[in-house]
Image (cartoon, rainbow, N blue to C red):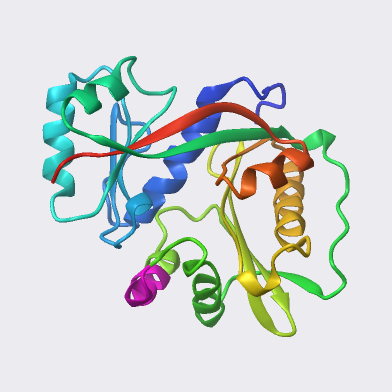
Amino acid sequence: MDATRSLRDLEPQLAANRRYWTGWAGTDSNADPGADLTVYRSDIAHILLNGVLRVRDVPLDAAVAEAERQLAGTRWAWWVGADSDEGTAEGLLARGAQQVGDMPVMAIDVTTVDDVDTPAELKISTVTEPAEMREYVEAYAGPLGFEPGSIDSVVDRELGFGYPDVVRLAGIVDGRTVATCTVSLGTEVGGIYCVATHSDYRRRGIATALTAEALRITRESGRRIATLQASSDGEPVYRRMGFEVVTRYRLFALPQ
């Protein structure tokens, strides 16, 4: 592990992102997070769970044709970040794509994080059993925009995730999983995903406490940097914790 990494070293953070999202393609997939054209397919009806994560040193016409071949019949997005060729966004727009998202990539040095008070009613548990996984998925499905009919598929894919180095933290209140946070430790930095809280339990510090636990796990693993992609609601929370915006992803949908 390289403990000298800084917030401005973007490639390890983007590599963490590619590693996590290709995990949704499952253990039997040939999705390669290091490929010049990084394509992944889960067949779950959610725009973030199928798509292209980068294109590098591949002519865009050829990349588009290959992406459309591999992702035909799915709902998918093309991520454009600092790890893609210059001009990719403009090239996609010229081919009729529409921008459907703009996400800040935020990072923090976990060795500088202050302690966070955990709400007295909150218990944080690591998800390991299939029954716990269903509760975990049901807790984030609504806040993260999953279709109700996709729950079984999402649970199956979480249980058969492409990589073993993922820790899922459940926030439990009165015996009910009301919040979630996933930590991916497959690369040099910690990646944080699926941070979600049931609407009845927001503004209690629960998501902050779960994120702080994810940062503790990252720090104790020997990593120095943690990274995430923030929603508009989450960005102010992460800023208060000390995260900084280091780059952005733009998401595009091509005509289908």
Tell me which corner region of the image, top left, top right, bottom left or bottom right, holds residue 33: top left
Frontmost residue, 104 versus 182: 104
Label the magenta part by its dominant secondary structure. helix
Residue 65 belongs to the span the image colors magenta: no
What residue is drawn where x is 41% and y is 23%? 83
Task: Give the camera-side residue of 117 and 27.
Answer: 117
- Between 189 and 222, the one lying in front of the other is 189
Q: In the rendered image, which quarter is residue 86 located in?
A: top left
Examine the rendering and report whether any part of residue 188 can be seen: no
Q: Is residue 161 left or right of residue 3?
A: left
**Looking at the rendering, which quadrant does residue 13 occupy?**
top right
Magenta span: 147-156
Determine if the magenta segment contains residue 150: yes
Q: How many marks?
A: 0
Where residue 19 appears, x then y in whole percent? 44, 42
Q: Quadrant of the N terminus?
A: top right
Task: Give the left or right position of residue 146, taking residue 126 as reference.
Answer: left
Q: Position of residue 8 (x, y in %)?
A: 62, 20
